[in-house]
Image (cartoon, grey):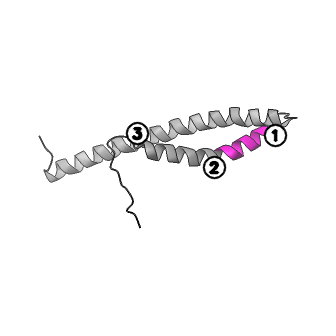
Amino acid sequence: MPRVEETDPEGVDYGWVMQTTFVLTIVLGAPVVGLLAFLRPLPTWTARAGFAVRVGAVVWLVTAVGVYLYARRTDVDADAGAASHADEDGDADG
């Protein structure tokens, strides 16, 4: 069996952000589109598809920004925590 590749990115892990955004957009977006569809008359399949694309795009954008900000905040917190632990141990450079 081939070995699984691992990475240790500096800063935000954009692969994780993209994967998480994809999953959350489907999990959260489908119910949102479904619920909002009840509030609008959508007589044709074209109207339904257009509505789903428009609402789905907004859900995707909000999810992507939220996931990115979460990843950036937790990365900053992790870096600050690592620096404070290194200072306590006396292992910090400088």
Q: Secondary structure at mark 3?
A: helix
Q: Secondary structure at mark 1?
A: loop
Mark 1, residue position: 38
Lower sequence index among marks 3 and 2 = 2
Residue type of the residue flagged with mark 3: Arg
Mark 2, residue position: 27
Q: Secondary structure at mark 2?
A: helix
Give the alpha-carbon distance from disc 3 to disc 1, as whole Å: 36 Å
Q: Nearer the viewer, residue 2 or 72?
A: 2
Taking 80 as reference, is 19 left or right?
Answer: right
**Residue range (magenta):** 29-38
Query: In which quadrant of the rendered image does the C terminus lie?
Result: top left
Q: Which residue is pictured at 76% across the width and 43% down the height? A: 35
Residue 22 appears at what percent x and percent y? 56, 45
Residue type of the residue flagged with mark 2: Val
Residue 23 appears at what percent x and percent y? 57, 49
Question: Mark 1 or mark 2, which is nearer to you?
Answer: 2
Residue type of the residue flagged with mark 1: Phe
